[in-house]
Amino acid sequence: MRPGARAVKTIFALLALSLAVGGWPGRLEAALVADVEADEHVTAPVVLDGATLLRVRGVSALPAHERAERIASRIAAAASDPSFDPGTLRVAEGQAGTEIHAGARRLMVVTETDTAGERASRAALALVYGEAIREAIGRFRADRSAGTLGRALFGTVVIALALAAVLAVVLRLGRRLEATIDERLRRRIRPVQIESYKLIDAERIRGAVRSALRTTRLILSLTASFVALALALRRFPWTRGAANNLLSYLVDPLRAMVRATAEALPSLVFLVVLAVIVRWVLKAARLFFDSVKRGNVTLRGFDPEWGMPTYRLVRIVVLAFAAVVAYPYIPGSNSEAFKAISIFAGVLLSLGSSSIIASIIAGYAMTYRRTFQVGDRVKIGDVMGDVEQIGVMVTRLRTIKNEEAVIPNSVILQDEVLNYSTYAQREGLIVHTRVGIGYEVPWRQVEGILLLAADRTPGIRREPRPFVRQTELADFCVNYELNVYCDDPHAMQELYTALHRNVLDAFNEHGVQIMTPSYEGDPAQPKLVPRDQWYAPPARIDGANPEALAGTALPPAAAAK
């Protein structure tokens, strides 16, 4: 082999050795940590009357916690046997290990596995365990003696009386303190206001102080009750274990929350920064589109009325993007529970919000299509009214009967919409009515009568002029259509009423009969209203047209008015 190749191999060998030696301490530390963690999981405490006597390890066939429960039950059975003398507890060698016997009853076996991590031999460890069991049996019997139980019961009564006294003092002093502070606040605190506008009401301040005092009183009462309960439970052997764990029931959740918060602190900082950035972006977007709405900023081909709807769309996009970015940093987002809840919420949203999403999309489509505006007189389906509000999901109309009609935007997008206000101011809205006149009446006369009625009607534009169309030559009559222009679509109903009144008067005035839709023969006398019957009681004449009254013979009752 050449010297150069040998040198290269030597260098690689030294490098590999150094990496191996350098990585050895880290692997050793990891192994020790793993061994300690494994030791915490494979050992279990033997507990009697809430006190831990010793810890035992599990084996493949018997887990540690199950073995500990069996040993504790054997010790309790031996302690409950009055014939057993704790002084006769003995330690002997057996086939599986060092055995601890209580008379003929074997309490436990100390194996080589139990000595792992202990700096003692199996026999010495068995002696220590035996002494601990002997003392535990003595305490077990002493705690259940009549004198001890009597003292425990008497102490519990004293604790209950002391708790009642403390609660009474806390309640009475709390009420007195609340009344005193409330009276002083009533005399000294005034509402915080600017001119006539109250920023903070004095009654709200007093209410906040009262709530704080009541909360403090509740916390003191609960603390006193908790301490009394713990003291009372510790006096009896059967409840001593629950008393020892009583504090952990409150501390463990708080400790877990603090630990989880500390672990999630970097993610929480990221979420806070993201929230601040998103908030400022939304503020800037709102300021921009608000300027577009007011006309301070003009965009070519962009209607100012689209400003706020576009801002809402931008806000949805920004929030959705922020949610996607923030999702991996949400504490617990990788847990199975969080994923299950997310899937469940998604299923509910997809099943129950299809109509809502359709209405929202329809609302934006209507906005950008300029279907109508607030204040327009429209007809949607069978509903006619004035647009009061155009929402994201629904549109509200005030009908001509002063009713509120709430129509989903998805229905509007699929239905027919008539907007009476679009061309009313610029070109005029055409209001029309139809009459049927017999063939024996000259059409020129009919058109003249209709135009005369139009001229008598107030609120009609004179330019463009009203016009008449002959829409149909029907079986029994000719159908005429009178068309007039008006500027105010909101006055359509009043205009129709006035126009129909003048049409009736004009035809009656000129002796022309308006035909019914169908008939079998001409009557002997035309169906007309004579002039002297136009204002028969209880008709009123105060609103009559002066031109229509010219030459009219009024009845005596009307003339008297």
Image: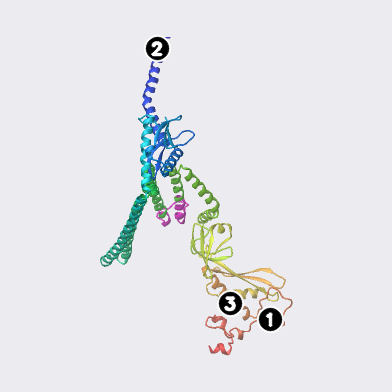
Examine the image and state in which quarter residue 432 appears. bottom right
In the image, is residue 179 above or below residue 529? above
Taking the view exactly as shown, the residue that stands out farthest to the right is 520
Residue at 40% x, 12% y is 6
Magenta span of residues: 291-314
Q: Main secondary structure of the magenta part?
A: helix
Q: Which mark is residue 526?
A: 1
Contact? badges 1 and 2 (CB < 8 Å): no
Determine whether, in the image, residue 49 is placed left or right of residue 494: left
Residue density around tag 2, few if under 14, some if 14–19, many if 20 or more, within 10 Å: few
Which residue in the protein does label 2 denote?
A: 4
Q: Disc 2 residue type?
A: Gly
Query: What is the number of the mark on residue 501?
Result: 3
Vertical placement of 102 versus 471: above or below?
Answer: above
- Judge left or right: residue 538 versus residue 264: right
- The kind of residue on which mark 1 rests is Pro
